Image (cartoon, rainbow, N blue to C red):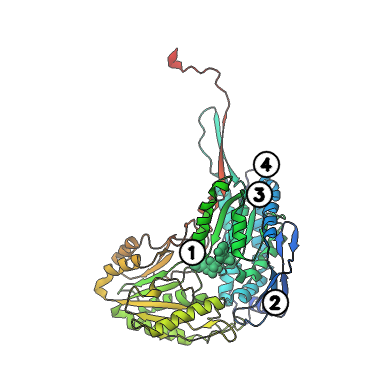
Amino acid sequence: MAKGFFQVPTAYNEPVLSYAPGSPEREEVLKQYKAFYNSKVDVPLYIGSEEIKTGNTRPMSPPHDHKHIVGQYHLAEQEHVEKAISNCLEARDAWANLTWEQRAAIFLKAAELIAGPYRAKMNAATMIAQSKNIYQAEIDSACEIVDFLRFNVEYMSQIYSEQPESSEGVWNRVEYRPLEGFVYAITPFNFTAIAGNLPASAAMMGNVVVWKPSDSQVYSAKVIVDVFKEAGLPDGVINVVYGDPVMISDTVLSSPDFSGIHFTGSTNVFKSLWKQIGNNIHKYKTYPRIVGETGGKDFIIAHPTAKPQQVATAITRGAFEFQGQKCSAASRVYLPKSTADEILELVKKDIASFNKPGSPEDMSNFITAVIHEGAFDKLAKYIDQAKADADAEIIAGGNYDKSVGYFIEPTVILTTNPKYETMYTELFGPVVTIYVYEDKDWSDTLKLVDGTSEYGLTGAVLSADRYAIDEATKALQNCAGNFYINDKPTGAVVGQQPFGGARASGTNDKAGSMQNLLRWVSPRLIKETFVTPEDYRYPFLG
Ligand SMILES: NC(=O)c1ccc[n+]([C@@H]2O[C@H](COP(=O)([O-])OP(=O)(O)OC[C@H]3O[C@@H](n4cnc5c(N)ncnc54)[C@H](O)[C@@H]3O)[C@@H](O)[C@H]2O)c1
Ligand SMILES: N[C@@H](CCC=O)C(=O)O
């Protein structure tokens, strides 16, 4: 037990560095990028104290140069997944009983390692693995992951200090136990920070974890593991396996000790995992916690009073940053007829100012590659469909080329059909669909926004009219878990805009918040009575 009521350092957001020409951080990250790019890494499974090389490997390539190999990673067989589970369970007692400030110190140290000596490595790995330009890498693999670690430590200590009242002669106390068993973290390709946070947040609360990163993010996941190791995370607390997701999930979800899933990824995968957990419910020792943040079809709606330049910038940044591969990316936009032409001209001007999609090593590139061939082919299919459909027109972009990298031009589809397929289907790429409404139909258009997609993740309203803002805020109440007024719908900052959505977008447990951490503990109430009754009779019985 701690011998003091320790106060953790006050959390603060890691400042975003500029990477301006001539800055030391720019020089350092480019040097690291080249070093990684011109070498080959061999990534093992991390199970207990072992680094296991199964020999069954898959190559890793940057999406912007897919013939170039930067290394390989080893795939798990079922026996390795079983071993990861047993290592978790062996590590559990020691980890769960370690005093909380020791756990906190490990993750605070990890934050400082990333903010300092590992910053260039985290960013360079993310530029290579996920094809992020340096700004997108910096806000993710440097700042956001550091913020997750610092703020979660603060939230953890706030949770522990939350205690019940005690009446005279009694002491009530609540102990925030880790879950009994292990947690399964499944992470997506698109954010290195999310990949690190999903296993770390559960581990911080005293849980042991089997972590399965995305195949497209293994390269940067390895740097996260290096950081956690250097920060002193004991062996067996977070065990890392990659490979066939179905086999891994079947194995994990069959274990009686499975006690929670921390998932971020697409909606269909999450729904199938939920179903599988339901089917296995009789096997488990405890009801598993199910936390999943999933897809989105995020909107921007502009009121006739919105300033065209501001709407255009919200679209350009919201739809095209990181090639639209943010769950929060603006992908359906509703513009009023009176200003639509002006806004669209400004968006086209922005797009014309981008370089052709290229490598993030060239720091003048705003747009780089989409993640893999599957994503490229899917996007190309929707673009071709829009070219063919009578109710859609491509007004910007529309070209693609996968000969070197998976490059898709930022594309704007203008549709006359508010229920056009790309107004409700998540494409997850640099494609935005625009519908122009009659100014007088503002209120009906809000209903349209609310009723068009199954998702409820992010959305933005731009308006200079406060009554219109109020109307939109009310009408779109269930349409977005993160709702933005006069801004783009992306770029939530940990500690400031807790992130997540409902409907088909997830369980809305708000990553990087106290609410999320509460899912990884099972409180035990301890009531201690100081003078224990010795007579059952009530006073009125005489
Ligand atoms: N709501 C959020 O906070 C949030 C954040 C980031 C990404 N996302 C969503 O994630 C998706 C993009 O990421 P992605 O392409 O990596 O998603 P994905 O669903 O393809 O993969 C996510 C993870 O699930 C694994 N997986 C895939 N099939 C599986 C299966 N059958 N069983 C078990 N695991 C399986 C993958 O290997 C990966 O680790 C988008 O839908 C995006 O909206 C949501
Ligand atoms: N939190 C990020 C999105 C994470 C999903 O991809 C944002 O707010 O843009």
Report whether 35 appears left or right of 489: right
User: Number of marks in the image?
Assistant: 4
Q: Earlier in the sequence, mark 3 or mark 4?
A: 4
Q: Which mark is residue 103?
A: none
Q: Earlier in the sequence, mark 2 or mark 1?
A: 2
Report whether 452 appears left or right of 8: left
Name the residue beneath numbered marker 1: 268
Name the residue beneath numbered marker 3: 101
Q: Residue at x 63, y 47 (%)?
A: 6
Disc 2 to disc 1, C-alpha distance? 34 Å
Q: Residue at x 59, y 74 (%)?
A: 130
Name the residue beneath numbered marker 4: 3
Q: Amino acid at mark 4?
A: Lys
Q: Earlier in the sequence, mark 3 or mark 2?
A: 2
The answer to the question of whether label 2 and label 1 lie on touching residues, with beta carbons closer than 8 A, is no
In this orientation, which residue lies closer to the viewer: 381 or 279?
279
Tell which tag, 4 or 1, sits nearer the viewer: 1
The picture places residue 59, in percent across and down from the top left corner, at: 67, 75
Name the residue beneath numbered marker 2: 36
